[in-house]
Image (tube, rainbow, N blue to C red):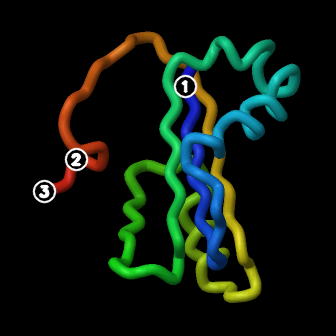
Amino acid sequence: MYGRIIWLRRHEVSIDVDNIAKPILDALKGVVFEDDALISQCLVTRIDINAKPDFTIVDAGAPGQSYQELIDLLADIQVDDILYVEIGSTDLQRLVFGIIDGGAS
C-alpha cells in the first residue's frame, strides 16, 4: 500500500516534514488498513500557502470533486489548514529517480 499526505497551511509550524506521517498513519490503523506496516511507500508534502515562491496545483485526474473542493478551500481565507490523505494499493513497486514532481528544472 502507499500513502500520500499533503498538508497545506497558512500559519508557521515547527514540525519537520518527516514527523507528519506517523501520527496520521497511526490514526488510520484499524480504520483504513489493518496495520501501517502495510504502507511500503509514503510521500509527505508540507506547503505554506502564504510563502513564495508560489505553488502550482494540477488536476491530473483527481478523484471525484477533490480538485474543486481543494480550490474552494484555498479560496476561503478562514481555513488555516487543509489535510489531504490518500491511501491506495500498490500492485507494482517502482523506483523512480529524479525530481519528484517531474517538472523541468
Q: Looking at the image, which residue is at 65% across and 45% down?
A: 20
Measured as percent of width and height from the top left, residue 21 is found at 65, 38
Q: Looking at the image, which residue is at 21% across and 30% down?
A: 97
Q: Residue furthest front?
A: 14
Q: Secondary structure at mark 1?
A: strand
Q: Which residue is mark 1?
A: 2
Q: Quadrant of residue 24?
A: top right
Q: Quadrant of residue 3?
A: top right
Measured as percent of width and height from the top left, residue 80 is found at 72, 76
Is residue 43 left or right of 22 when viewed as pictured?
left
Bin the neighbour count of mark 1 within 10 Å (Cα to Cα): few under 14, some 14-19, many 20 and up.
some
* Residue type beneath disc 1: Tyr
Q: Compared to 64, does 81 lie above or below?
A: below
Q: Residue furthest left?
A: 105
Q: Which residue is mark 3?
A: 104
Q: Earlier in the sequence, mark 1 or mark 3?
A: 1
Measure the C-alpha gap from mark 3 to mark 2. Answer: 7 Å
Q: Which residue is mark 2?
A: 102
Q: Secondary structure at mark 3?
A: loop
Q: Compared to 57, does 24 lie above or below?
A: above
